[in-house]
Image (cartoon, helix red, strand yellow):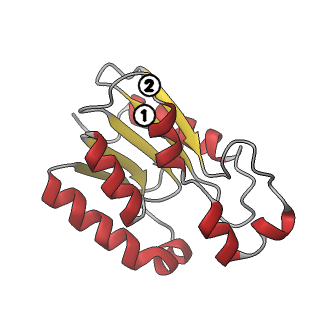
Amino acid sequence: MTRPDKWDLRLLGLAEHVAQWSKDPSTKVGAVIADDKHRVLSLGFNGFARGVRDLVERLGDREIKYDMIIHAERNALLFANAPVDGATVYVWPLLPCAQCAATLIQAGIGEVVAPAADAERAARWAAQIDLARTMFAEAGVSVVELENFAPD
């Protein structure tokens, strides 16, 4: 299969859309888990746990926010109503962090598709993304980073 195909574009576009549901003022992240027939198994975006208030002072304080927020990839796994073994996760706007990579690997995800990170995000998250790439490679999880992503 040539990358990206129409399903990569559609599902990554859906992850981009879902990311907009996040109330995080600095980085809105969306994740879509799909099976090998491109059926959506789950969606997730980064945010606080159910019932926890999205207060501006919490969202504006990076240290507090990082302690409280659930990443999009984990939310997608938590809300999946079917097994995700061998499934693909589409993540917007960059590859998962190392902790999410470990969780995705443990859940059985077989492939990760994300846009190639822009320069600003790549610099800020470089160490996390590099560690995630290493973990995915060691675990046999395929990683596809799409250049010049534009949904159809």
Apparent side of residue 103 relative to residue 69 in the rendered image (left or right) = left
Secondary structure of the residue carrying numbered label 2: strand
- Amino acid of disc 1: Ile
Q: Work out which quarter of the rendered image holds the N terminus and state it.
A: top left
Apparent side of residue 151 relative to residue 57 in the rendered image (left or right) = left
Q: Quadrant of residue 17?
A: top right
Q: Position of residue 72 (x, y in %)?
A: 54, 48
Residue drawn at point x = 32 percent, y = 19 percent? 37
Mark linked to residue 33: 1
Is 82 in front, or is 122?
82
Is 16 in front, or is 141?
141
Q: Work out which quarter of the rendered image holds the C terminus and state it.
A: top right
Q: Position of residue 52 (x, y in %)?
A: 75, 50
Residue drawn at point x = 37 percent, y = 46 percent? 113
Secondary structure of the residue carrying numbered label 1: strand
Mark linked to residue 25: none
Residue drawn at point x = 44 percent, y = 38 percent? 77
Q: Which residue is mark 2?
A: 41
- Amino acid of disc 2: Leu
Is 46 in front, or is 39?
46
Q: Local crowd at mark 2 within 10 Å, few (<14), some, or many (≥20)?
A: many
